[in-house]
């Protein structure tokens, strides 16, 4: 019985969170969602930078073929994400 109650509580919480998110997006005239940001990053990186496809995919947390792939590309991902941040917010912050 406790399991059903906790599952129902989680469902109620998620429903409330989604309703609040929807309301905030509509009230603030936001026409994008997080997946759109990921897509924008990928498009920008492919079209405007020289980063290798594997670096881009790893930065998006997509699966990179791992048979002989022994690196997490962390330094290159960090550099990509800093370039993305600089593109989004040019100039000193």
Image (cartoon, rainbow, N blue to C red):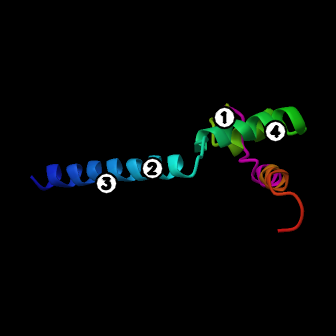
Q: Residue at position x 13%, y 56% from top?
A: 2
Distance from the alpha carbon under mark 1 to that under mark 3: 37 Å
Of the image marks 1 and 3, the number of the one nearer the N terminus: 3
Q: What is the secondary structure assignment of the residue under circle 3?
A: helix
Distance from the alpha carbon under mark 4 to that under mark 3: 36 Å
Distance from the alpha carbon under mark 3 to that under mark 2: 15 Å
Q: What is the secondary structure assignment of the residue under circle 2?
A: helix
Of the image marks 4 and 3, the number of the one nearer the N terminus: 3
Q: Which residue is mark 4?
A: 45
- Residue 69 is a magenta residue: yes
Mark carried by residue 66: 1
Of the image marks 3 and 2, the number of the one nearer the N terminus: 3
Q: Would you say 25 lies left or right of 87 here?
A: left
- Residue 15 is a magenta residue: no
Q: Residue at position x 16%, y 53% from top?
A: 5
Number of other residues with Cα within 10 Å of mark 3, as a class: few under 14, some 14 to 19, many 20 or more: few
Q: What is the secondary structure assignment of the residue under circle 1?
A: loop
Number of other residues with Cα within 10 Å of mark 4, as a class: few under 14, some 14 to 19, many 20 or more: many
Mark toward the viewer: 1 or 3: 3
Q: Would you say 33 lies left or right of 13 here?
A: right
Q: Position of residue 29 (x, y in %)?
A: 58, 47
Closest to the observer: 26 or 59?
26
Distance from the alpha carbon under mark 1 to that under mark 4: 22 Å
Closest to the observer: 54 or 83?
83
Q: Which residue is mark 2?
A: 23
Q: Which residues are magenta?
A: 67-79
Q: Position of residue 92 (x, y in %)?
A: 88, 67
Distance from the alpha carbon under mark 2 to that under mark 4: 32 Å
Q: Position of residue 35 (x, y in %)?
A: 60, 39
Q: Are marks 1 and 3 in contact (CB under 8 Å)?
A: no
Mark toward the viewer: 2 or 1: 2
Q: Which residue is mark 3?
A: 13
């Amino acid at each position: 019985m406790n399991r059903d109650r906790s599952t129902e509580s989680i469902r109620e919480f998620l429903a409330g969170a989604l309703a609040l998110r929807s309301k905030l997006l509509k009230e603030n005239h936001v026409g994008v969602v997080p997946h759109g940001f990921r897509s924008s990053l990928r498009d920008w990186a492919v079209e405007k930078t020289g980063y290798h496809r594997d670096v881009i995919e790893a930065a998006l947390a997509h699966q990179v073929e791992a048979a002989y792939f022994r690196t997490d590309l962390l330094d290159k991902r960090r550099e990509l994400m800093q370039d993305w941040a600089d593109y989004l917010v040019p100039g000193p912050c």
